[in-house]
Image (cartoon, rainbow, N blue to C red):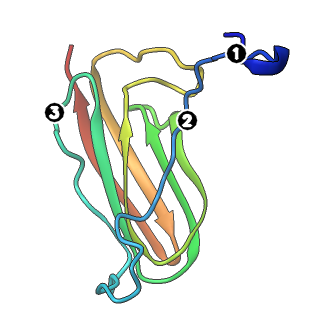
Amino acid sequence: NVLSEGTNSVLVPVYLTIIEPLATDESLILPEETRLHSAYPNPFNPSTTFRYSLAEKTHVSLIVYDLLGHPVRTLVNQVNPVGEYQLQWNGKNDQGQVIGAGIYFYQMMAQRLIKTHKIILLK
């Protein structure tokens, strides 16, 4: 596109995964405990949503593993403030490849919490 005064604009696609608290208004009730909620839907195809709550600012890791315990996808590996979080996983590994149908586990580590849940990817 050519704009006035001879300047150009170029449109390029940008893909982002943004993890934000579901509620940022401090007047809202904050989580009393850190916990990992069940994924929904489960079983899933092609994507599922993960939710977790943080009772205090802490480093969080949320990783999907295969049945052999190999990491498939690191979804979160950062410090998050207090709040409720959700993110969607598209069934792809860290290299961007679609993974096969089967049973997988997702594990969250935060504070003193280590929690693992099972998910099933259908084809």
Dot 2 and dot 1 residues touching (CB under 8 Å): no
- Tell me the residue that label 1 is attached to: 10
| Figure quadrant of residue 33 | bottom left
Mark 2 closeness class: few <14, some 14–19, many ≥20 residues within 10 Å:
few
Name the secondary structure under disc 2.
loop
Q: Position of residue 92 (x, y in %)?
A: 44, 23
Q: Position of residue 66 (x, y in %)?
A: 41, 31
- Which label was assigned to residue 25? none
- Which label was assigned to residue 16? 2
Name the secondary structure under disc 1.
loop
Mark 3 to mark 1 CA distance (whole Å)? 41 Å
Identity, as a three-letter code, of the amino acid under mark 1:
Val
- Quadrant in which the C terminus appears: top left
Identity, as a three-letter code, of the amino acid under mark 2:
Leu
Q: How many marks?
A: 3
Identity, as a three-letter code, of the amino acid under mark 3:
Pro
- Tell me the residue that label 3 is attached to: 43
- Foreground label between 3 and 2: 2
- Foreground label between 2 and 1: 1
| Residue nearest the viewer, comparing 112 with 68 | 112
State the residue at coordinates (19%, 20%).
122
- Quadrant in which the N terminus appears: top right
Mark 2 to mark 1 CA distance (whole Å)? 19 Å
| Residue nearest the viewer, comparing 19 with 45 | 19
Q: Position of residue 16 (x, y in %)?
A: 55, 35
Q: Residue reaching furthest top?
A: 1
**Disc with the residue nearer the chain's start (2 vs 1):** 1
Relative to 52, is 34 above or below? Answer: below
State the residue at coordinates (42%, 65%).
21
- Foreground label between 3 and 1: 1
